[in-house]
Image: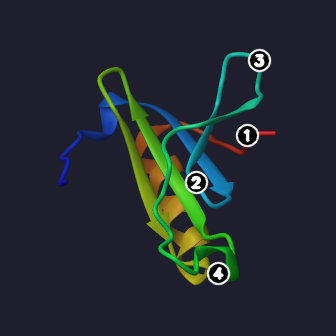
Amino acid sequence: MLHSVAYDEVIGLFVSHSREPKWAGPDGRALTLMKADAGKLGFLKGAPDWLTVRTKRVFIPLRVRDEDLSRITTELESRTGTKIVRPK
């Protein structure tokens, strides 16, 4: 599914290193956004990095390569004025 969101619509940015994308609830604790299908041998794969963009209407989970995560999060923080949150 493809989403288009204006930068000023973003109200939260969450980064997690887990099998499923996570975001932080009001108390800061991690909540699972959705179940990601890793396939039959998914247990052998490492946990990927997820960047979840939150707007008032929708959560958008993005699977991000480790080498791209820093650059993407820096750009999104700069363009949206929102700080990255890492769920506990």
Left or right side of 70 for 6:
left
Amino acid residing under circle 4 = Lys
Q: Nearer the viewer, mark 4 or mark 1?
A: 4
How packed mark 3 is, by other alpha carbons closer than 10 Å (few <14, some 14-19, many 20 or more), is few
Residue at 76% over, 17% down = 27
Q: CA distance from mark 4 to mark 3?
A: 30 Å
Q: CA distance from mark 3 to mark 1?
A: 10 Å
The answer to whether marks 3 and 2 mark residues whose Cβ atoms lie closer than 8 Å is no
| Label 1 environment density (alpha carbons within 10 Å; few <14, some 14–19, many ≥20) | some
Residue 83 occupies which quadrant of the picture? top right
Task: In the rendered structure, find residue 87 and report the number of the disc placed on it.
Answer: 1
Q: Residue at x 66, y 23 (%)?
A: 25
Mark 2 — residue? Answer: 20
Residue 27's tag is 3
Name the residue at 49% across, 47% down. Answer: 52
Q: Which residue is mark 4?
A: 45
Residue at 18 percent of width and 46 percent of height: 4
Q: Amino acid at mark 3?
A: Asp
Dot 2, how many residues are within 10 Å of its Cα: few (below 14), some (14-19), or many (20+)? many
Mark 1 is on which residue type?
A: Pro
